[in-house]
Amino acid sequence: MNQLNVAIVGSGIIGANHAEAIVRHPRLRVAALVDARIEAAEALAAKLDPHPSVHLTLGEALAAGHIDGAQIDLVAICTPSGLHVEAAEQTLRAGAHLLVEKPLDTDLAKARAFAKVAAEAESRGLVCAVVSQHRFDPAMVAVQAAVREGRLGRITSAVVSMPWWRDQAYYDSADWRGTWAFDGGGAVANQGIHLVDQMLALLGRPEEVYARTALVCHEGIEVEDLAVATIGFAGGALAVLHATTGARPGLPVRLGVYGTEGSAVLHDDQLEYFHCAATPEVKAPDVVPQEELYGSAKAPDGFVLGHLRQYQDIVEAIDTGRRPGVRVEDGLLALALVRAVYVSASLHRPVDFGQVLDGAFDNVTVFTQE
Ligand SMILES: NC(=O)c1ccc[n+]([C@@H]2O[C@H](COP(=O)([O-])OP(=O)(O)OC[C@H]3O[C@@H](n4cnc5c(N)ncnc54)[C@H](O)[C@@H]3O)[C@@H](O)[C@H]2O)c1
């Protein structure tokens, strides 16, 4: 099987995590690193063997020949969130497969237009995926299968909670953090979007969102560090979403999904509780063939492992022509739900999810109560 050459755009915290996942995958290699601060790309390149080429722009990386003169097969976009769609469009225009970090972008209108571009690219055989690595956690895979197969019966409700802590230094560490334009929001848009996406994967399409947001314990940021929302789903289920970066010392995420035939609780991404009438006990299978991916190397930490699992999904999608596990349309739905939370909180009333998704609230200026 041929090696796939990957270009990573954005050589910051998550770019380095992508690089670590890629070097552990037998089919992938980091061929190029891009960063607007060339020293960031150079510093990361120096840690990799063989050294990838380094570039100031994605255009430069796509045009250059790489290891063995090969072209870039896959681009991983790891820049600040407000720059995602632009680089994603450039990737697909160049005919490369795409993995874009969450959230899909910060601007729902731009993301909506890009979803059409991605659908067209998919029809040409390109794989277009959005990072949501916790969808590939073995426990999440097991619960998704149980819901899909109807083993929990009709889903009646869900409760998801992210009581995390981010100190002030985190928000001060880069100019783009905590801004509407480049972070797209706070606790929900940046950290909580993982849970938002998991909730959507389990409960389907929302109908109505009623939210409150607040800035309770950080300074100098535009966005919320606390959000609470109730969400009504098309099937009649109701869910509660709680996301904060103001809960010292930071506790694990929790996701409970409850149905007429059974219930499941994920705690810290592990299966804490599972019950259904037909199969009272579920063991979460490991979805990654570990020995194949890790070889004799030291097992990766959880942060790297999550991305490694998603890369495995993408390699399979490229090899077989099937759709990846998390598509651009999933990223669009997650972004629309995040936007619905902010629109509802700003207007102090429930909002119709479909209308937010379709653009009826695109011109609402959102803000956070202090
Ligand atoms: N999946 C996850 O669990 C996860 C975790 C952290 C961050 N993220 C996402 O990854 C993205 C980046 O976050 P981060 O924490 O790595 O940020 P970061 O600030 O550490 O890194 C961003 C990098 O992008 C570079 N950059 C800025 N503009 C650029 C441009 N136009 N072209 C090329 N490079 C440019 C910056 O110089 C910086 O090195 C965000 O969208 C964030 O939401 C995802």
Image (tube, rainbow, N blue to C red):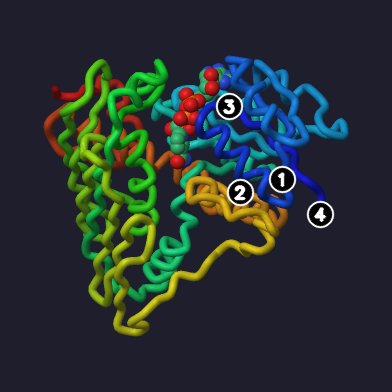
Quadrant location, the C terminus? top left
Circles 1 and 4: CB distance less than 8 Å?
A: no
- Report the residue marked by disc 4: 1
Q: Find the distance from the CA under tag 2 to the CA under tag 1.
A: 9 Å
Question: Looking at the image, can residue 170 be seen?
Answer: yes
Circles 2 and 3: CB distance less than 8 Å?
A: no
Give, as a three-letter code, the residue at label 1: Leu
Q: Residue at x 29, y 21 (%)?
A: 363
On residue 11, which mark appears? 3
First in sequence, mark 3 or 1: give its number: 3
Question: Looking at the image, can residue 111 be seen?
Answer: no
Q: Answer yes or no: disc 3 within 8 Å of ligand 1.
A: yes
- Mark 3 lies on a secondary structure that is loop
Q: Find the distance from the CA under tag 2 to the CA under tag 3.
A: 18 Å
First in sequence, mark 2 or 3: give its number: 3
Residue 98 shown left or right of residue 319 in the figure: left
State whether residue 296 is above or below residue 170. below
Q: How many marks?
A: 4
